[in-house]
Image: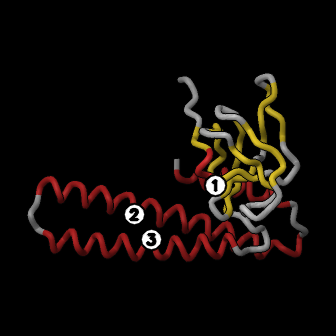
């Protein structure tokens, strides 16, 4: 599962950036950083489960303190890597391809900043897709018109806080 998520992210990274061949080194570096981010995130999840297990079965706070310190260290590494990826020439973090739905009247911005131009406002329950994130915004990479998905080629960004992951019927 982990490898398929990473492969998917790398495929989107390559498909979505349209960089010339001379940027191959940076793309390879970003692939490595994405892989490391996934590994560190998995380690944090495992350690958090250990903390929960220890809380319910043990009174040994020394072990929990060690685990919490390890989690803090890993989260610092994750933050540093996210910053590196975010500051790359691509200018965004590649996330798992996701279908999102607006939870409020959501402003659509021309760039991932509240200072940028507001191009539109979408009503609650508007569905769109994304695989790019920057500065707590998600890029609209596709949207739905009459239940048909349409690829977006424009710079449309929505605040992450104005949308949530849409749970599809199983």
Q: Which residue is mark 2?
A: 44
Q: How is the image coloured?
A: secondary structure
Q: Position of residue 59 (x, y in %)?
A: 9, 63
Q: Nearer the viewer, residue 144 or 3?
A: 144
Q: Which residue is mark 3?
A: 75
Query: Visible in this render: residue 103?
Result: yes
Give me the C-alpha separation between circle 3 and circle 2.
7 Å
- Of the two numbered discs 3 and 2 on the same chain, state the one appearing first in sequence: 2
Compared to residue 39, the image places residue 73 above or below, namely below
Q: Residue at x 63, y 70 (%)?
A: 32
For disc 1, the neighbor class at 10 Å (few under 14, some 14 to 19, many from 20) is some
Provide residue 71's location: percent of width, then percent of height: 36, 70
Nearer to us in this view, 157 or 51:
157
Q: Are marks 1 and 3 in contact (CB under 8 Å)?
A: no
Label 3 environment density (alpha carbons within 10 Å; few <14, some 14–19, many ≥20) = some
User: Label 2 crowding class (10 Å Cα cut-off): few <14, some 14-19, many 20+?
Assistant: many
Image coordinates for residue 34, horizontal then vertical, percent: 61, 65
Q: Which residue is mark 1?
A: 95
First in sequence: mark 1 or mark 3? 3
Identify the mark nearer the N-term, 1 or 2: 2
Would residue 170 appear left or right of 72 to someone viewing this image? right
Q: Position of residue 101 (x, y in %)?
A: 64, 37
Are the residues at dot 3 and dot 2 in contact (C-beta closer than 8 Å)? yes
Tell me the quarter of the picture where residue 122 sits: top right
Q: Which quarter of the figure has residue 58?
A: bottom left
């Amino acid at each position: 599962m982990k490898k398929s998520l990473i492969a998917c992210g790398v495929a989107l990274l390559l498909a979505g950036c349209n960089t010339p061949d001379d940027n191959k080194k940076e793309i390879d570096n970003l692939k490595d950083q994405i892989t490391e981010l996934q590994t560190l995130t998995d380690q944090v999840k495992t350690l958090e489960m250990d903390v929960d297990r220890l809380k319910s079965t043990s009174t040994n706070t020394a072990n929990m303190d060690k685990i919490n310190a390890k989690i803090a260290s890993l989260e610092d590494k994750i933050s540093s890597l996210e910053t590196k990826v975010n500051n790359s020439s691509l200018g965004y973090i590649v996330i798992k391809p996701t279908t999102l739905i607006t939870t409020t009247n959501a402003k659509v911005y021309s760039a991932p900043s509240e200072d940028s131009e507001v191009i539109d406002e979408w009503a609650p329950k508007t569905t769109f897709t994304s695989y790019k994130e920057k500065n707590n915004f998600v890029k609209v990479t596709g949207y739905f018109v009459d239940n048909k998905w349409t690829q977006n080629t424009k710079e449309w960004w929505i605040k992450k806080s104005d949308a949530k992951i849409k749970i599809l019927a199983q």
